[in-house]
Amino acid sequence: MGGAGYAYSHLQSQGRRYLSWRDLTAELGYVRWPVQVVSVIKSRDKFARILADTIPRGTPNPPAVDYRHREALLIALGPRSSSGYRLKIVHIMRRGRRILVVLREVTPRLGGPQRAGLVFPYRLLTIPLTDTSVRFHLLHRL
């Protein structure tokens, strides 16, 4: 499986607890997401349907996830115009009865090393299986 993400499960404050997560983006590989996709995925079948519906030609195979113990979170921004765009995970935390996923879209800087051309920033993460709702919050561009 993929490398471990930031793990802050020992930190707690005011009913908030940071969750550990794993980044599987590299395992899915380069994907040309034609639209924005945000989804909580609790089965391989659902993930396969999302991929087939969104990417009908050259549909990639979903990476292995132990859905008995974990759930996948997919956040794809859709096409962007240069290699300077990235999607950064700020943190994932349990807040009350919700899981909050906070992300930031990093945009290119003038004069930076980016190249023109379509890119498709996305992140595929897994978190421990939960029965609480998951909310996504995309912070302003940086």
Image (spheres, rainbow, N blue to C red):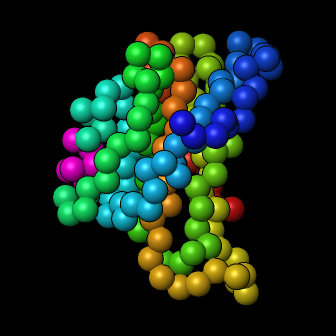
Task: Tell me which secondary structure the magenta stretch mostly adopts.
Answer: helix
Residue 41 in view: yes
Quadrant of res 3: top right
Q: Which residues are magenta?
A: 49-54
The residue located at (64%, 62%) in the rendering is 106
Q: Determine whether, in the image, residue 7 is placed left or right of residue 141.
A: right
Q: Is residue 54 above or below residue 49?
A: below
Where does residue 86 sit, x and y in percent of width and height? 59, 62
Q: Is residue 98 above or below residue 120?
A: above
Q: Determine whether, in the image, residue 30 is placed left or right of residue 110.
A: left
The residue located at (66%, 35%) in the rendering is 4
Quadrant of res 78: bottom left
Where does residue 26 sit, x and y in percent of width and height? 53, 52
The residue located at (70%, 24%) in the rendering is 18
Where does residue 2 sit, x and y in percent of width and height? 57, 40
Q: Is residue 30 above or below residue 102?
A: below
Residue 102 in view: no
The residue located at (69%, 62%) in the rendering is 142
Magenta highlight on residue 3: no
Observer-nearest of 116 and 63: 63
Where does residue 74 sit, x and y in percent of width and height? 43, 42
